[in-house]
Image (cartoon, helix red, strand yellow):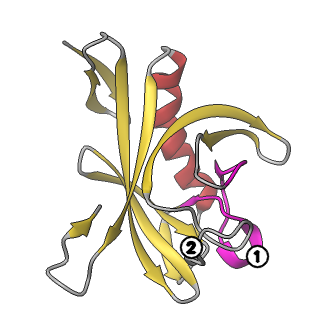
Amino acid sequence: MQRVWEISMERTCIMYSTLNKGYLTLQLEREYLPHGTNGTLYLYGKPICHTIELPWRDNRRNVSCIPEGRYRLVRSLGRRFHYCIRLLDVPGRSGILIHPANDAATELRGCIAPVTTHTGAGKGVYSRVAMERVEDVVYPVLAEGEDVWLEVLSVDHSATGNFVR
């Protein structure tokens, strides 16, 4: 059984688990760089936007991007960003959000920022536009009581360009 959503003029299917509860999984494929982490956010293999994050620094609070893994997303009321998307159950971290920012080093403390284009390591442009794209995918699914998950992976450039889980 599947439910079909009209999102950004494309048909998107929500898969159903054995408990008949729907879910949607986004994939974030990352490239780790010395001064920032650049990624691309995908829905069913199609890019939604790019992302920027802090560099990997052993998951230290406020200075590192989060570890790879699978995280549930919820809509949350943030102090600074009004409504935003919160990641749940990030190991050793709390308050991790998806919110607009164009420079990871000066605007992020472990969160993920969608951008339309990368301009450097941990830098991008038109973050609010990219955030709207993410919201257009995530919020309607959450509004129907369905789960949304983010799967964070890394790109292995040393071998064949395959993705590592």
**Place of residue 49 in the rendered image (x, y in percent of width and height, measured from the top left):** 43, 57
Residue 31 spot, x, y in % from top left: 40, 76
Q: Residue at x 28, y 30 (%)?
A: 12
Q: Amino acid at mark 2?
A: Gly
Q: Is residue 3 left or right of residue 23?
A: left
Residue for point 53% across, 29% down: 139
Q: Tell me how many marks there are.
A: 2
Kindly identify the amino acid type of the residue bearing the numbered disc 1: Thr
Q: Quadrant of residue 19?
A: top left
Q: Position of residue 62 (x, y in %)?
A: 74, 67
The N terminus: image quadrant: top left
Residue that label 1 marks: 106
Residue 7 seen in the figure: no
Q: In the rendering, at what x and y percent does residue 108 appear?
A: 71, 66
Within 10 angstroms of label 1, few (less than 14), some, or many (20 or more) residues? few
Residue linked to disc 2: 124
Q: Is residue 2 visible?
A: yes
- Residue drawn at (39%, 63%), measured in percent from left and top? 40
Q: Quadrant of residue 6?
A: top left
Numbered disc 2: secondary structure: strand
Left or right: 39, with 11 as reference point:
right
In magenta, the rendered stretch is 93-114
